[in-house]
Amino acid sequence: MESGEMGKLLDILGNETRRRILILLTKRPYFVSELSQELGVGQKAVLEHLRILEKAGLIEGRTEKIPRGRPRKYYTIKRGFRLEVLLTPYTFGTEMYEPKKPRQTAEYAQARQLIKSTEPAETKIGELLQFLGEIERRVDEVMRTKQELEEVRLLIETYIENLLRRIAQENEREFERLMREFGPRLPRKIVEDLNDF
């Protein structure tokens, strides 16, 4: 996602009412009148927030025919994603991850096997919860590793940028030579920051 689009997304999510709407929609589909009642906000305002969220591709509306009266439109979450914001004294950045169709890993196959098993419900739930616990422990471990690697990456990027800034102040010719040599390999954010320097 481009930085301009990311900025728009952050603006959209920066509104408390829109965040509350998204939280409600994670529970079940809602009609406008239900959202209005839950939030204590007028229907016209809710419709405007829904329009903004729908235009951003975060939610979708579907019309449902009801036995009596005119069809009603209900809203659901359209897609899931994870948004991370990195803010340090030297860096500001965002990354977005959208879940993809799961690869056919051994874990996925094991989960499918447990789900399809014909064991009694009590046994099946116990086995699924045990497997879920294992998956959660592995996810926690991966997240800790990711955090540690992010900190190392930030340390290296900050050092490189500070070193190049110092060289630029002391010897412009040497700085230009280094930028020609290493510029294509430098993280884009460092290049942009150095260009603004």
Image (spheres, grey):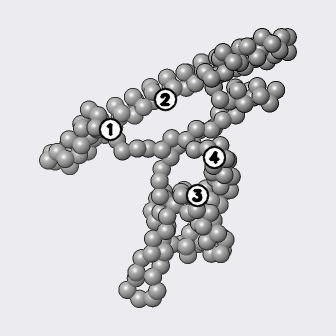
Circle 2 SS class: helix
Q: Are marks 3 and 1 in contact (CB under 8 Å)?
A: no
Left or right, 55 with respect to 4, comes to left
Badge 2 amino acid:
Met
Mark 2 is surrounded, within 10 Å at the Cα level, by few (under 14), some (14 to 19) or many (20 or more) other residues, namely: few
Q: Which residue position is annotated with label 4?
A: 6
Residue 46 picture location, percent across and down: 62, 69
Badge 3 amino acid:
Ala
Q: Which residue position is annotated with label 2?
A: 143
> Mark 2 or mark 4: which comes first in sequence?
4
Q: Marks 1 and 4, how far apart in space?
A: 27 Å
Instruction: Identify the residue at image location x=40%, y=82%.
Output: 66
Instruction: Identify the residue at image location x=45%, y=88%.
Output: 69
Instruction: Identify the residue at image location x=45%, y=62%.
Output: 28
Circle 3 SS class: loop
Q: Marks 2 and 4, how far apart in space?
A: 23 Å
> Mark 1 or mark 2: which comes first in sequence?
1
Badge 1 amino acid:
Arg
Circle 4 SS class: helix
Query: In the orientation shown, which residue stands out farthest toward the bottom?
Result: 68
User: Between tags 2 and 4, which lies in front?
Assistant: 4
Q: Marks 3 and 1, how far apart in space?
A: 27 Å
Residue 116 picture location, percent across and down: 19, 47
Q: Quadrant of the N terminus?
A: top right
Q: Which residue position is annotated with label 1?
A: 103
> Mark 3 or mark 4: which comes first in sequence?
4
Q: Marks 3 and 2, how far apart in space?
A: 28 Å
Q: Which residue position is annotated with label 3?
A: 56
Circle 1 SS class: loop
Q: Are marks 3 and 4 in contact (CB under 8 Å)?
A: no
